[in-house]
């Protein structure tokens, strides 16, 4: 029996689909129907049903470029930092193994090799970096699970990334997984889908990122549990990395949208004198995941496959027909 928290979220729905395909018994919960953020409620429930595994896919994301109100910050802190701590206490008290969905957004940049040495470049939107990636992607390496997050409250970051990094700091149970996904996507139009976000914005930030094909990466998380892989932190992204520019080209070629996209390039603080907004563009290393025998589809192939199977939201279809 699997207890799935955050079952109505974009990632939670993917876990529910995967568990149904595997014919695994599971109980889906959402905070709108059961307040599992309360320690006493969750403790009594977990002790009663005694699940083999608890999965926390609850998440409070942010809209890029949008300033958060104080109440929104408190809600995000509660969902992304306090709730995982509550779950850890409950699972520790009941000896329940569990998995927590984290995010690769706690990093920014990548390791770039030159003359046999690798150094971190935190700004992957620089024109020189993007040109180098186009010519020599093999010179780029991602952050591993052993690298300390460099996009957290200890440095410059978004509030969302700070809350996710803070949660990871507090989770030191010997019986839990931390699964880091990055900009998840699949073929279903959704506000949390990276491919939808690109199509919904006319002005796009051109950079380089690791991505997670949602259903494939969720299956990888469950495979880690099924194989009884060692507990710990795992980067769960598709092999390789991709430029926003290349994804936009694929969208134009496959979906043929009627409008154009403008890619924004930040070379410096700009003529306006305004600083760049903090961004968590990053590449993650998946060597640890691959050592378990789990293989994922290369990222560009995964994007193309999702676009060829694209299922637009009903409102988008009606707008197109109009």
Image (cartoon, rainbow, N blue to C red):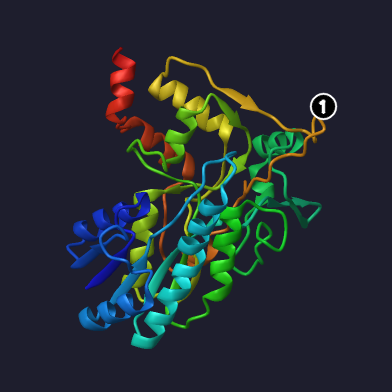
Relative height, residue 204 to residue 69 (above, below):
above
> Which residue is at the front of the view, 150 or 270?
270
Asked if residue 182 can be seen in this view, the reply is: yes
**Mark 1 Cα-neighbour bin, 10 Å: few <14, some 14–19, many ≥20:** few
Q: Foreground: 231 or 193?
A: 193
Q: Is residue 67 left or right of residue 25?
A: right
Q: Residue at x 32, y 61 (%)?
A: 31
Position of residue 268 relative to residue 215, above or below, is above
Helix, strand or loop for disc 1: loop
Q: Is residue 171 above or below residue 188?
A: below
Q: Quadrant of residue 93?
A: bottom left
**How far across and down, in percent of the image, does residue 299 sit?**
47, 44
Residue at the farthest top position:
322
Reading the image, the residue beneath label 1 is: 271
Quarter of the C terminus within the rendering: top left
Q: Is residue 105 visible?
A: no
The percent coordinates of residue 278 (x first, y second) are 68, 46
- Is the N terminus in the top left, top right, bottom left or bottom right quadrant? bottom left
Q: Residue at x 43, y 14 (%)?
A: 258
Count of marks placed on residues = 1
Viewer-side residue, 53 vs 304: 53
Q: Position of residue 134 (x, y in %)?
A: 65, 35
| Quarter where residue 128 is shown | top right
Above or below, comparing residue 225 to residue 11 in the picture? below
Residue visible at 32% across and 38% down in the picture: 188
Q: Residue 72 appears at what percent x and percent y?
A: 51, 51
């Amino acid at each position: 029996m699997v207890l799935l928290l955050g079952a109505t979220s974009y990632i939670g729905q993917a876990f529910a689909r995967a568990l149904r395909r595997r014919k695994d018994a599971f109980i889906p919960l959402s905070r709108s129907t059961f307040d599992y953020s309360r320690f006493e409620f969750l403790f009594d429930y977990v002790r009663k049903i005694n699940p083999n595994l608890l999965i926390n896919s609850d998440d409070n994301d942010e809209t890029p470029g949008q300033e958060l109100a104080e109440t929104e910050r408190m809600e995000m802190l509660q969902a992304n930092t306090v709730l995982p701590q509550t779950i850890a206490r409950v699972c520790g008290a009941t000896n329940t193994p569990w998995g927590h969905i984290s995010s690769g957004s706690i990093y920014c940049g990548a390791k770039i090799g030159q003359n046999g040495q690798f150094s971190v470049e935190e700004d992957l939107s620089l024109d020189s970096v993007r040109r180098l990636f186009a010519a020599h992607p093999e010179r780029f390496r991602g952050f591993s699970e052993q690298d300390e997050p460099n996009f957290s409250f200890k440095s410059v970051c978004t509030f969302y990334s700070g809350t996710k990094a803070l949660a990871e700091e507090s989770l030191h149970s010997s019986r839990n997984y931390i699964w880091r996904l990055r900009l998840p996507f699949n073929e279903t139009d959704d506000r949390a889908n990276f491919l939808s976000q690109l199509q919904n914005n006319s002005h796009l930030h051109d950079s380089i990122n690791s991505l997670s094909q949602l259903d494939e990466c969720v299956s990888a998380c469950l495979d880690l549990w099924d194989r009884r892989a060692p507990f710990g932190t795992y980067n769960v992204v598709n092999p390789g990395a991709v430029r926003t520019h290349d994804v936009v080209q694929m969208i134009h070629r496959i979906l043929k949208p009627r409008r154009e996209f403008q890619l924004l390039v930040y070379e410096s603080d700009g003529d306006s004198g305004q600083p760049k907004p903090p961004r968590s563009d990053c590449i993650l290393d998946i060597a640890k995941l691959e050592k378990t025998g789990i293989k994922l589809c290369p990222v560009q192939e995964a994007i193309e496959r999702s676009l060829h199977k694209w299922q637009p939201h009903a409102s988008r279809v009606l707008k197109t027909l109009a």
